[in-house]
Each structure stands twice: as C-alpha cells, then as structure tokens.
Amino acid sequence: MTALALPDRIDLATVRPLQASLQCVATEDVALDASSVTHFGALGLQLLLSAAKTARIAGHRLEIAESSEAFDSALTRFGLSREDLQHLPDAEAPCH
C-alpha cells in the first residue's frame, strides 16, 4: 500500500498537483495521511471522491489512515465521513 501525505491546504492552488499524485489509485492501494490538513475545500472533496471511485472501479482501496480535526470537520460540513470516502457504493448502483 502506498502512503500519501495530503497538503496542509486542499484548495484550488493544490488540487492539480494532488490530482497528479493520486493517479496511482488506479494501479495500487493508497493510504492517505490527512493529519496535517488545516483547510479542506469543496474542490478537494470532489478530487478525493473521484479518486475513491477510480480506486474502487480498478479493484483497489483508498483509505484515510490519519486525519486532522479540520479534515474531519470539513467532511462533516459536506455531510460525509471518513468511512463514506472509503466505502463508496458500487458505480453501477442507481441514484435514489
């Protein structure tokens, strides 16, 4: 499993380099370290959801190994949890 530390701020300025770093989810399991995250914006959420879906479709796992209070609080504000990111529904499941 590859370990990947997330930047302190996940926003417009950091999404593109983070996207490049997350390409490995298509070929291997990845454990994210979000313990130093102080700001987690909606673009970052979109990127992590996409990476989680890509990993699942490819038969790999994307997990949040560590997280900061700021990261967890942002997820809560978005209506999600760490577990939601790690256990997305099947890609073929219909929307309700």
Image: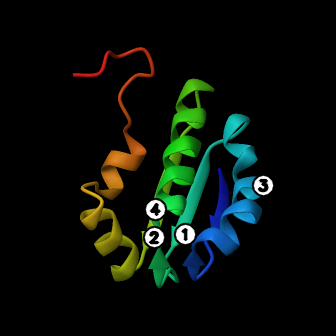
User: Which disc number belongs to residue 20?
Assistant: 3
Q: Is residue 69 above or below residue 61?
A: below
Residue drawn at x 47%, y 69% as measured from the top left:
41
For the residues labelled 1 and 4, the Cα–Cα distance comes to: 18 Å
Give the residue type at disc 3.
Answer: Ala
Give the residue type at disc 4.
Answer: Ala
Give the residue type at disc 1.
Answer: Asp
Callout 1 touching callout 4 (CB < 8 Å) = no
Q: From the viewer's perspective, is 22 left or right of 93?
A: right
Residue at the spot of label 4:
42
The x and y percentages for residue 7 are 63, 77
The x and y percentages for residue 83 are 32, 50
Between residues 38 and 58, which one lies in front from this camera angle?
38
> Quadrant of the image for the C terminus?
top left
Secondary structure state at the residue bearing disc 1: strand
Count neighbours of disc 3 (C-alpha within 10 A) and say few if under 14, some if 14 to 19, many if 20 or more: few
For the residues labelled 3 and 1, the Cα–Cα distance comes to: 16 Å
Secondary structure state at the residue bearing disc 3: helix
Q: Nearer the viewer, mark 2 or mark 4?
A: 4
Residue at the spot of label 1:
33
N-terminal of the pair, mark 3 or mark 4, is 3
